Amino acid sequence: MLVRVLLGVCWLLLAAGGNAESRVIAVTVDGVVHPITLEILGNALDQAQQENAKAVLIRLNTPGGLLAATGEITESIVGSPVPVVTYVTPSGGRAASAGFFILQAGDVAAMSPGTRTGAASPVLMGQEMDEVMRRKVENDASAALRSVVEKRGRNAELAEKTVLEAKAFTETEALENNLIELVATSETALFEELNGREIVRFDGERQTLELDSPVIVDYELTTRESFVSAIADPNIAFVILILGALGIYVEFSSPGLIVPGVAGGILVLLGLSALSVLPVNWIGVALLVLAVVLFVLEANFASHGILSIGGSVAMVLGALLLIEGPPELRIRLGTAVGVTLPFAAITVFLLTLIIRARRNKVVTGRAGMIGELGLAETDLSPAGSVFVHGEYWDGVSDSAIAAGSRIRVVEVDGLKLKVESVGQEGGSND
């Protein structure tokens, strides 16, 4: 009997403990939406499913991002077996453009006071679109958004205007117009409001949220996700790529230094890795290559700075056009100019030093003896002994030269120097 009682007590304690903890997996989207964002959110949703979490909290503070990545993120959220709460936070933050799509994908959409959302008009490659293409892209985007918003029971007509008319809303306006369910001052207040709330999942199933004093578990980024997220900013990727190119150039210009070459190679690969998750415009790549070519030509030809100016302009334009995407995803003008000017100055300076060194008179080996001045130690008629460069040599001359006369080396034949007489103004190096 005692054993049964103890087992019953243990079972009750375990059951109470299991009900007491409502685990919520929280993940933050802070910055531009791109493919690495999709990977992070996908892994967070998988973790929530594996750990039987009660919900997934997606904290949003984004200016937008790539439409393709946003579409896949939306699909992942609406297909999640675990309820998803999208929450625009902190105060002053926003869920604009692609962020509005993600906000509307959640089973529950909420915002902090002082936040905003909307302005979801698509921008094709960050460029102007003709009227027909614009209508096609906008209609497709609005249809995709409408299909999600209607299922969530929100104001589909007004949500569609964020795409067609680029409308934006404060948290109060979004709540009053049924674009979100809640305005919450904090996550604690948010979960207090959600506890016991009945929601309708995307497939029509009704579910009651059990979020009494939930345990918030922040999704921990993998090493790869942390690293790629850190360098996926196109501005950082561009700086890394240019630094790598400069390191490789220094190694080629001064072979044997090793460190610049190794560091440059690593940086170039890191830069390319970061850019690989972003849509690259090959016109921008071509302009960057042209810039390097113009810098090389500047050191070889006296263009009075024209080639350097052209190279700088080409590099700035190449940087601005390098990424195909909305304005938030492209390289900023300040970054382009800030990287281009030092790169141009360093490259032209190094190239100038190399070319000058190649044009200088050879100072070592047999060729380095040509033109050296010295003294005739004995009479040269035509052979004798000469003192050149601190050494005694056998000398020969086409004409007689008296001992003590100043001579100049005109040819080296084995261990014999062919010399000629020079006037007193020639000086000596002895």
Image (cartoon, rainbow, N blue to C red):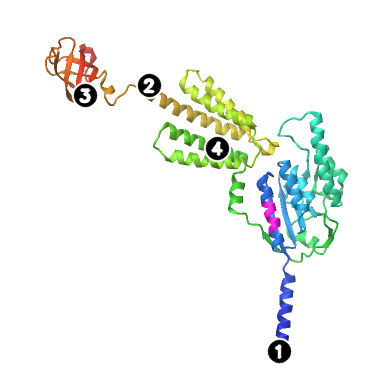
Q: Residues within 10 Å of mark 4 (few under 14, many from 20)?
A: many
Which residue position is annotated with label 2? Answer: 359
Position of residue 330 relative to residue 379, above or below, is below
Which circle marks residue 2 in the picture?
1
Q: Secondary structure at mark 4?
A: helix
Report, in whole angstroms, how far the alpha carbon at label 3 lies from the one at label 1. 110 Å
Of marks 3 and 1, which one's residue comes earlier in the chain? 1
Magenta stretch, main secondary structure, is helix
| Total numbered labels placed on residues in the image | 4
Region of the chain picked out in magenta, as a range: 40-46
Report, in whole angstroms, how far the alpha carbon at label 2 lies from the one at label 3. 22 Å
Which residue position is annotated with label 3? Answer: 389
Q: Secondary structure at mark 3?
A: loop
Which circle marks residue 84 in the picture?
none
The answer to which of 246 and 411 lies nearer the viewer is 411
The answer to which of 89 and 41 lies nearer the viewer is 41
Q: Position of residue 100 (x, y in %)?
A: 77, 45
Q: Amino acid at mark 2?
A: Arg
Q: Residues within 10 Å of mark 2 (few under 14, many from 20)?
A: few
